[in-house]
Image (spheres, helix red, strand yellow):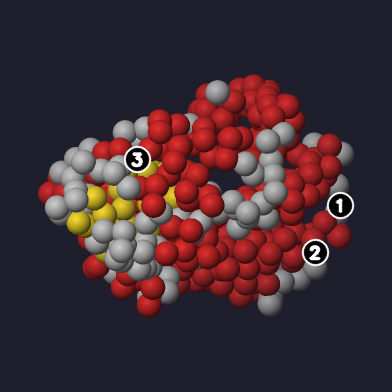
Amino acid sequence: MRYDAFISYSQAADSPLASALQAGLHAFAKPWYRRRAANVFLDKSKLAAAHSLKGVLIPSLEASGHYLLLASPLSARSEWVQAELSYWLANKPHDRILIVLTDGDIVWNRPGNDFDWTATTALPRLAARAFPDEPFYIDLRWAKAHADLTILDPRFHDAVARISATIRGVSLDEIAGEEVRQHRRTRRIVAAVMTLLIVLAGGVAAASMLALRSGWEAQRNLASALQLTKTIASDVIAGMKDLKGVETKRIQAITNRAIGQVAVLDTHATSGTANQIREVKAALDLELAELTWRLGQGPQSIESARRAQSTIAELRAADPGNSAWIALLVRCQRLIGEFQIDTENGARAEATFREALQVVEHSATKTEPGAALDISRIYRGLGKIFMDSSKLAPALDSFRKALRVADEDIAVADRDSEWHTQVSSVLDLIV
């Protein structure tokens, strides 16, 4: 896999800022049809025993176009930062090093054409004589006092724009203009989508309540109303996953309203309708979990996924062999496992993935719509865990299983663009 930039930093000093920069560079001036505007490597588990510079970080450094150093006194003393910078200086172009000052000082000695090492505290000494002229750096020392930075902050927006323009090889004016165009387009789309969802969610809820209260054909009417809710709300939520430049609270308010409309039905459910309503609730909670995760709202994502998990457990208690409900469980486990990987808990993620695969082995879940994609992503997740632990043989085996599941469901692969993304990403990892 190729990276536009590699972020080198001290976890003790700059972990939140490094994550915010990665998220900002992924999102800045991103076309709506792409998952990321730029691909930025950020290692969040340097202290894990299984990690090594040679086994994990050197391939990522080699695959990166730029080296983004978050400079501070702690990073200057960091063994990992020194090793990463040393490798870059020995093997990669020095003019591809970008410095972001997060703490301490950087002072240039013009007569000596080098850093003034009596006053510079934010760089390791191995940077001496590494630059033919005074390097430009971005001063983000002010960011220490700001939690939850996003590109909605004007100063952070400016910093991300400058870095993004450099790593993408375009002028600042060009990338700023693209960001404005994408932002305006996104707001128009979201405004229309939100209006549509409010109208549809309210109308479906009213139709469903009427179905519950009516005597004959209540079951059929309810089933139709619930299916409409599930299809429309799920499609709309899914369609908002890649949108940016819109306040997260507004999107969450709309998606929560859709789930709330279905929750209202639960209070009026009869023994014949309860499971139908719970299935829709679980499906919408899973959509919300994916959406909020992409919006950077980790706690809300996990809460939604856990809520869905609890609902699915209630369903399976009534019918353990129901393949549709097992498919929901597999998707839920896949999401939770991916969350755990992103929060640096590979061991728990592996356990979550294996638990899901054990359930799949004893059911007809693969025939359910979308289930094969979740299973393939679970194998890919396992492969990434093994690769990060330098277990290359089981990693390759997992990646091959991910591709095998795709081959077994070629009809889906041919018509679903997400399958092509999945296959391409797995092949990148294998290569």
Residue appearing at x 31%, y 63% in the figure: 118
Query: Which is more foreground, mark 1 or mark 3?
Result: 3
CA gap between label 1 and label 3 equals 51 Å
Residue appearing at x 69%, y 64% in the figure: 306
Pointer 3 residue: 66
**SS at badge 3:** loop
Residue appearing at x 74%, y 47% in the figure: 350
Amino acid carrying mark 2 in the image? Glu
Q: Earlier in the sequence, mark 2 or mark 3?
A: 3
Pointer 2 residue: 314
Pointer 1 residue: 320
Q: Is residue 197 above or below residue 29?
A: below
Amino acid carrying mark 1 in the image? Pro
Residue appearing at x 27%, y 50% in the figure: 163
Dot 1 crowding, Cα within 10 Å, few <14, some 14–19, many 20+:
few
Q: Is residue 429 above or below residue 295?
A: above
Residue 278 shows up from this direction: no
Q: Earlier in the sequence, mark 1 or mark 3?
A: 3
Viewport quadrant of the C terminus: top right
CA gap between label 2 and label 1 equals 10 Å
Dot 3 crowding, Cα within 10 Å, few <14, some 14–19, many 20+:
many
Residue 5 shows up from this direction: yes
Q: Position of residue 126 (x, y in %)?
A: 39, 47
CA gap between label 2 and label 3 equals 50 Å
Q: Which sits in the foreground, 146 or 416?
A: 146
**CB within 8 Å, label 1 to label 3:** no
Q: Is residue 210 left or right of residue 217?
A: left
Q: Which sits in the foreground, 194 or 57?
A: 57
